[in-house]
Amino acid sequence: MCMDNATNCDTLASNLAKEVASFKGMAARTRCAPHIINLCAKVFISFFFKPPRKKKQAALEESADGQKDNDDDVAMEVDDEEDEEHVAPEDEMVEDDVANDVDSIDAAREAHDATRVLTVREQAKKEAKEWYVRSNGAPLEMTAAEEKTALGIFPKVAGLARRVHDTTILQEAFAALVEADNKHKAKENAEALAAKKEAPHEIPEQKSTLGRRMPTRWNTDLDCLTDYADFKDPVTELCSSPRYKLGKYLLDTKQFALVDQMIPALDPFERITALFSRAEVPLIYQVLPLMEALEHDLVRIRDDVHRAPVVRIASHATLILLGKYYALTDDCETYATALFMCPNKKDKALLANADWAPETVAIFRERAIKEFHNDNPDQAEEAAAPPPTRPKKKKRAKDATHVDDLIDDYDNNSMATATNQDTIEAYFAAPPVPVIEIRSVGKPGPNGAGKGDVCDYWEKAKATRPRLAKFALKHLTAPASSVDAERAFSNGRLQVNHLQHGMSSQTFKARVALHSWDGCPFFPPGTAERLLAERDARQSKKKSK
């Protein structure tokens, strides 16, 4: 059973084992890999995200209802942009979270995530300082000024994206700045190529606005950050203009330098998130290799003395959390068994892996063998008995014995294969299967090469090794994510938010305006369509110049 990492899921697994005899409790409880990656990314990002000052719920409700003395008329006269100029970027995000109803998405999961992030942050700062003194003679720590600089990054980046998305004037101004900047970069690229030099700029294709942060999806933080960095010149020009009063959203030089280090550090999280977000269900045999690869990337970043201390400490904090959940996978044998049943890996690949101790591999190997024989009790005695061999003829001195020896080997191997190929002992004894052989099982891709995976391999093997194939597929096809189930049942609001996010605030405002015109006596029929058509024509004419 695959569930997220909240403690109430542990309680469910333990109690379910008491009600269902065939369910093994925590030994059969797998963990949602996307949730682990999401939580690790949150820990890293928390070092660059100053928490907002929480407002009292009563004050929020009072403000929303407009029931504060006689302030209704006054509030309507206040210009939004003037008012927001005096609000700190991090405090603006409170309204974003309330508007998206973040706290009610999944109370247990949100409480678990928030507590875990805060705990790991403090643990990482303490460990980095003490551990590096012992190992390197110098502490790994950041000053209060460095921490303050880092914490201001995401509130500024997300705040600017929100303002640009919510204000038509800012949208159009930013789009014009991006267009001018792209033309300038394209000109410089053309000049460089003409001089047979490498193009100095990478121009984002078909994008003229900033990605907007969505509180329910960590990767929108990265999108927002990446766009801010890609559009550095237009962003700087927009925020520096006294007309728009957006100076509080402009990153300083030190913050821009940190952004250049943050984006590569967050890219592995984005790649894994994209993998687990595909239409195909992510499977459990993919989890441990990805966690190990992510661990190695984080260690490399943490130990890089050329990176900023806050980036290194953030990586160490992420390593602490990742290590915790990696260790918890030992409670469920399916993770290791699924790797064993990858024909290109088996136990041999794990023995060659420095992350696995030989003793640990041996323990999980014996557990896999035991489980296989529990599923196939008729094979236990067969596996214990030695494979039959054909007696060799007595060689005469005058015979050329090389042919006899070779044919005897062929005969013995064929008998052993026919008898034992459907046992897990024979599977472990055979060498790993080449990856090209596994891929050849699947349907050919555009280039003619096969696209088969380990599941396709065992589906084909059902004809010759039915019991082994059934055992392998039982573990290999276990899902690595519980996202779909959560959205459909306990986490249904997440799906609602997803649909809401598909419509921008400007689209919503435009639809409200169009609806208000419908049937209104002040405008003749067709006014809305005519105005929209005229605007489209102006925009097309402007682009063609």
Image (cartoon, helix red, strand yellow):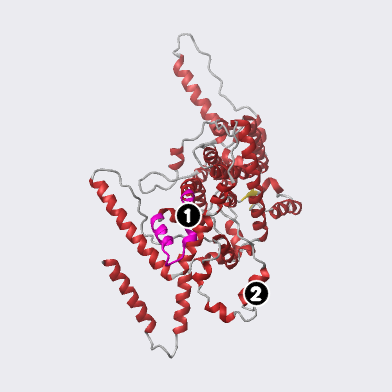
Circle 2: residue type = Glu
Residue 332, located in which quarter of the rendered image?
top right
Residue 167, percent across and down?
Answer: 45, 69
Q: Which residues are magenta?
A: 232-255
Image position of 348 (left or right of 379): left
Q: Residues within 10 Å of mark 1 (few under 14, many from 20)?
A: many
Res 265 seen here: yes
Q: Which mark is residue 451?
A: none
Q: Residues within 10 Å of mark 2 (few under 14, many from 20)?
A: few
* Number of numbered discs overlaid on the protein picture: 2
Residue 40, percent across and down?
Answer: 58, 48
Secondary structure found at label 2: helix
Q: CA distance from mark 2 to mark 1?
A: 34 Å
User: In the depicted view, which residue is nearer to us: 505 or 283?
Assistant: 505
- Name the residue furthest right: 18
- Name the residue furthest left: 194
Circle 1: residue type = Leu
Q: Which residue is mark 2?
A: 62
Residue 509, percent across and down?
Answer: 47, 75
Image position of 90 (left or right of 184): right
**Closer to viewer: mark 2 or mark 1:** 1
- Please give the name of the residue rendered at 55% of the width and 39% of the height, measured from the top-left corner: 302
- Name the residue furthest bottom: 521
Q: Which mark is residue 251?
A: 1
